[in-house]
Image (cartoon, rainbow, N blue to C red):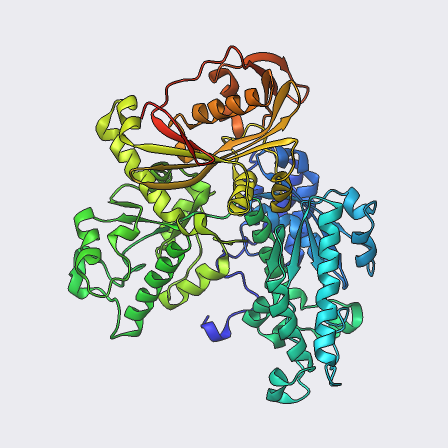
Amino acid sequence: MSPSSRDPYALRWLLEPPADLRAQLKALRKDFESNPHVIRRLAGYSLDVSQLNQLGKTIAARRDDLAKAGLRPFRVAIAATHTADFLITALPGTGLRHGLLIDAFQADYGQTAQAVLDPASTLFEFEPDLVYLAFDPHALGLGSPRLDEGGGEEAVQSAIDYVTSLRDAIHTNSSAGVVLHSLPMEPAALFGNFDASQPGSVRWMIATFNARLAQNLKPGDVFLDLAALAEMVGLSAWHDAGRWHEGKVPFALDAVPLVADHLCRLFSAFRGLSRKCLVLDLDNTLWGGVIGDDGVEGIALGQGSGTGEAFAGIQSYAKQLRSRGIILAVCSKNEETNARIPFQSHDEMVLKESDVAVFVANWTDKASNLEYVAKALNIGTDSLVFLDDNPAERERVRQELPEVAVPEVGTDPAEYVGILSEAGYFEAIGFGAEDRNRAEMYQANAERVSAMQKIGNMDEYLRSLEMVCSMRPFNSLGRTRTAQLINKSNQFNLTTRRYSEAQVESFETNPAKFTLQVRLVDRFGDNGMISVLIFDRSADEWVCDTWLMSCRVLGRRVEEAVLAHVVDAAKADGAKRLIGEWLPSPKNGLVEKHFERLGFNFVADLPEGGTRWALDLEAYEKPALPMVVETTGAVAGSEA
């Protein structure tokens, strides 16, 4: 199918579902235990509204089994000024594709304001993680022209005030985040092309509202650019006038799977589950031809042909992803010497060897090599996206590593960038210095692993890193990154409690909370913020509410340095002991013995299956550490 003739609603990065999908789903409702991973595989196909509905029924029937399989529970409430039933039924199946076990709630039709302004409403009783405020131009007073003097500006500001007041009410009445969305442009024009510049026309008001809303986001807000999605589909395909007049359905039903996917990728990003690394094949993926057969002069790349420019475009997009913190890796069946030649000597290579964190070129199967890439970067294979032109290789990886995202890119390299972008694997809900530098951080981490292998002795290796560990209370500069870590850290996370950015902000000035953000720098570079702690303070004891750490710094003795700082602060506050709890989750078995390793004494088993520990502050002895520790501007002595 040519780009001009393809289905505008298609989730074209996904494979078409099997013909017997309905039968497979029906069988799963009866016999889930025989193959519990099948349902997640089926969710990974491009499903229409009816198929998502069928998948949702299977999820409902097997919810307890899916919860045990390690899916992240997620609760979303929709408060809409139009019909949203179709999204409610589509979200559970779509969420499964993104690793989420979704419970969805819908406020009564026409009761948007009442649902969010009343703190005792059923919406807040539902205890959502996110509330999606879904509006249409007519409900906001932007559906009809306002051509009187200043009328358009008045209508836009009134709409902004209304939306942000409801947003603020949600933040006041709950800890939930809020999804706000831009408004798709209406297809009918009053003045024709002049609409865009005429204040008070519907197009002018919607464009002005969208720009102003994006400028009014607060911590805890998530932005869905529905206007951009409608433009991608095409306004004539997006809008269905008949559906609107009959049932106040704001867009064509065929667009439901696409909207649901965009929502669920935002939910996933909100929970810190976006992908981190793009792994690239080489031959016929980054250039045309086979480097081992065609030589550097024979491959198609760069100016001079449409095909060559398409491959250069793929490299440019990959480099742009790296500039926003996405890690790049190479996984190719090739002789490594040949594979590196274009990076070193082809004038039109956009990517350089220095852009690639892990370079794997050999004749081992790609699934095994992808596992190696993840291990070298100290991330999970579920953080990988694998771009490969070869359908057989794509299918092999899907079978061997179903958690790796493998877009179905087709045969035209000119389409690769569009397909990869549309898939939304690297969805972001914010962007800061930590995000910008993430690729360098992980690349430096791979170098650390190599250094450790060369030195061998752990103590010598740690001293050779020349580490500087800095500890600060929560503040506005680190707020976004702190919230990101809280919502995405799973393995080294003692309690797996989740807090929104707005809640993190409230902790900054709460005297009952002791907060800590920890950063680590070494001779290879800045690791950024790598640990977050929250303790509840009382006269005699401090109780650990949250203690998490990035797994990329495991084994560096950072947790010992952190504990020493907490002990000093607690003693200065008059406390006698620290209390720690381990609350089990599907992924945090790594830290089951964390408090025991740090010298805490066992107190009791907890009803929910965890354990409680205590540390006598007077009996605590501070260890010698292979790092310099900086606390709130002061430098504490160390062994470094």
From the viewer's perspective, is 38 left or right of 345?
A: right
Residue occupying the point 76% across, 43% down: 126
Q: Nearer the viewer, residue 484 or 290?
A: 484
**Relative to residue 64, is residue 427 drawn left or right?**
left
Residue 190 vs 474, above or below: the answer is below
Quick check: 531 above or below 94? above
In the image, residue 37 lies at what x, y percent? Answer: 54, 38
Looking at the image, which residue sits at the far top? 619
Give whichever of 426, 571 is nearer the camera: 571
Q: Residue at x 26, y 22 (%)?
A: 457
Identify which residue, 235 or 186, lies in the foreground.
186
Task: Judge whether 483 appears above or below 614 on screen.
Answer: below
Query: Within the image, what quadrant is residue 201 found in?
Result: bottom right
Q: Residue at x 69, y 57 (%)?
A: 87
From the top left corner, tell me how far across and down residue 607 is, in percent.
Answer: 68, 19
Residue 405 visible, this orientation? no
- Quadrant for the C terminus, please: top left
Residue 110 position in % (x across, y down): 82, 61
Q: Position of residue 283 (x, y in %)?
A: 27, 57
Residue 608 relative to residue 460: left or right: right
**Toward which corner of the image does residue 446 lie, by quadrant?**
top left
Front residue of 606/238: it is 606
Total marks shown come to 0
Residue 336 visible in image = yes
Q: Where is 100 relative to 409, above or below?
A: above
